[in-house]
Amino acid sequence: MESVTKNRQSSQVLKAMVARAYGQDSVPAGHSSWYSELGDGWFSAAYRIRLRGGRDVVLKVAPPAGIEVLTYERDAMRTELKTIELIGQLGDIPVPRVDYADLTREVCDADYFFMEHIDAENLAARMGELPRDEARRHMVELGALNRRINSIVGPAFGPITGPHHSSWDSAFLQMIDELLADGERRTVDLGATSDGIRQIVTGNIESLREVTEPRLVEWDLWPGNVLISGQGICAVVDHERAFFGDPLIEVGFAGTQSAHFGDSDAFMEGYGHPGLSTTEVTRRRLYQLHLCLVLTIETAYREYGDPNHSEWARQQLAESLAAF
């Protein structure tokens, strides 16, 4: 997806990045045949690079400093690196190895890191072609992997790198307030006033108080961030939106509220989650509202250039508001 947040670099700068990460002997020769942009992402720029020795690696570059992003997206790459570190400590989640990270912003105008290249296919790209049983098997496996990731307990609720909150309801309310402020800065039409949306959240805040333990939440672990091979899931990628919160907010559960987000049955089976309780339904409605606010407001910042996507996001937001 095209987005103004994608921080593309010249071949000269890419060579400087390679030299810093792997040494001058690994810098490829030529101008362009050794790298290609990976276009599936919606936020950061990513490249597949063939080092001089023949090994392929992936470079991920954060948005440039001059591009305004949503509040929760600031320093997203640092969040991702910390999340990869936390997940790596589990030892059984397939996450690409990080070879080198540079947060100095000396070589280019943003954070970046290199990681191993995984020769596999994107699950979202293949989902429509796979036999139904095979597609379901991948989603069952994804649910189990997501539950394992959610087993990581954080120090408090909120962003991985802070600020932290002692309660989930306080952290979630801040997430909503930040989104509403982001929308107001770009005068985004949400189909309701910011005060009205905040009242919906505060009016249902009691349901969030069931959540007492901060768990690592990926939040963006949808099929587009899953790589598969003949053996099943071989990597999960893009961890920049993680935080410590309620696992029920994971996108794998979004289908419980709207068929537009897929069928959650296979995911929930793999996760081992029974049907939602009355209070969990309320929480899921709040989380769906949060998700749809993100999808709608980010279109004003990313400048995707696809009016169909913007209209789709607004329709989902209208449905999530109608649920209350």
Image: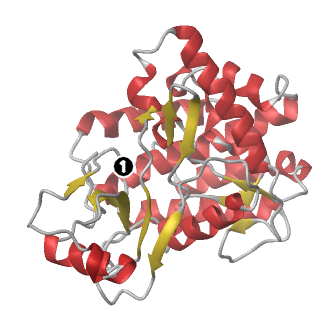
Residue 303 showing in the rendered view: yes
Q: Which of 184 and 104 is in front in this view?
A: 104
Image-quadrant location for residue 58: bottom left
- Looking at the image, residue 47 lies above or below residue 65: above
Q: Which colour scheme is used?
A: secondary structure
Height in image: 94 above or below 31?
above
Q: How many marks?
A: 1
Give the farthest residue toward the left.
31
Question: Does residue 301 appear to the left or right of 295 in the view shown?
Answer: left
Q: At x 87% / y 28%, what residue is drawn?
A: 277
Q: Is residue 66 visible?
A: no
Whole-percent x, y for residue 271 in the image: 77, 32
**Residue 311 location, x and y as percent?**
33, 35
Q: Which residue is drawn at 44% across and 30% down?
A: 124
Whether 140 is drawn above or below 151: the answer is above
Circle 1 Cα neighbour tier, 10 Å, few/some/many (<14 / 14–19 / ≥20): some
Q: Name the residue under label 1.
A: 41
Q: Which amino acid does label 1 sit on?
A: Gly
Q: Look at 20% across and 70% down and name the residue there.
A: 9
For the C terminus, the quadrant is top right
**Residue at x 54% of width, y 29% of height:** 319
Query: In the depicted view, which residue is nearer to us: 10 or 209?
Result: 10
* Residue 132: quadrant of the picture: top right
The image shows residue 222 at horizontal and vertical percentages of: 54, 38
In the rendered image, the vertical position of residue 56 relative to residue 257, given as above or below: below
Task: Tell me: 299 left or right of 35.
Answer: right
x and y percentages locating residue 101 in the rendered image: 47, 76
Q: Quadrant of the N terminus?
A: top left
Q: Mark 1: which secondary structure?
A: loop
